[in-house]
Image: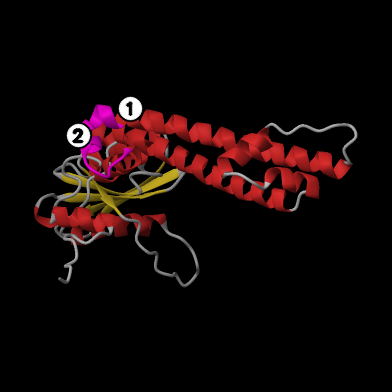
Amino acid sequence: MLAGAVEFVIGVDTHRDSHTAAVVNAATGGVVDQLSVATDAFGFRRLKAFADQHADGSRVWAIEGTGSYGAGLTTSLLEAGEWVVEIDRPARPARRDGAKSDDLDAVRAAREALSRQHLAQPRARGDREALRVLMAARQGAVVGRTKAIGQLKALIVNAPQVLRDQLRRGTTDEQLQRCARLRTLPTHSIEHRATVQAIRGTARRALALEAEAAEYETELERLVVAICPVLLDQPGIGTITAAQFLISWSHIGRIRSEAAFASLAARPRFPPAVDK
């Protein structure tokens, strides 16, 4: 635990535009001083100078949201050789006046770190962050394609009879290709022309999102091969599974044991027994 390892814990409550830090004495839990800064390079330097002044000894930073609002500060501190641990954003107790206090939340982050037996290291950036952003973008494209296909199916069901008979057969891929090539004639009714325009645009959107997702997957495969090619040699592990594994694992030391990784993955540590 931190109480016997450091003299000070600096808790940081992170937000989009401001960070609030509280220096807490590790032995007593008392608050030494507090400071709020903007979330920019100048603000990060102010926090470092603040820590040098009020926590001039062995110290650790307990930061909420190291992978989101606290990512910039975390990166800056790690580059400066500081010890940083990640604290999950705790539930905020209701306050009688409904007000929010960043100062109290920063102190709570520091004391939360002091009370824990196991503390997580911040997730790595670099290769891992490259995988994460590509996975997020691919997921958005896949979800968008699925929604576009659902919309297309509904448009076909409600299309004029001639269009419906023309488009409702075949696989989804065949429907997408056929719908994307639809044309109209001046002799068609306004309903027919409008429906064709909607169906064609929706199909083309689905195809564009499919191509976008494939492009992300190609880049993900390149990164996985560069980082840990042995993963793709394992039975049942493809590019997406391997990428997610590397994102969750992050780096050596973040996950302390096999059991901790099993807990993170929400899977049993051992396969269930099978009755014979």
Callout 2 crowding tier (Cα within 10 Å): few <14, some 14–19, many ≥20: few
Where on the picture, by quarter, is residue 176? top right
Q: Is residue 128 above or below residue 271?
A: above
The magenta span reads 224-238
In the picture of the structure, the residue carrying the numbered disc 2 is: 230
Where on the picture, by quarter, is residue 228? top left
The mark that comes first in sequence, 2 or 1, is: 1
**Whole-number angstrom distance, CA of label 2 to CA of label 1:** 13 Å
Specify whether residue 78 is in view.
yes
Question: In the image, what residue type sits under mark 1?
Answer: Arg
Q: Position of residue 235 (x, y in %)?
A: 23, 43
Q: Quadrant of the C terminus?
A: bottom left
Q: Position of residue 227 (x, y in %)?
A: 24, 30
Q: Position of residue 164 (x, y in %)?
A: 74, 48
Decide which of 103, 89 is in the foreground and name it.
89
Q: Residue at x 43, y 41 (%)?
A: 136
In the picture of the structure, the residue carrying the numbered disc 1 is: 222
| Residue 231: in magenta span | yes
Q: Residue at x 22, y 45 (%)?
A: 121
| Residue 208: in magenta span | no
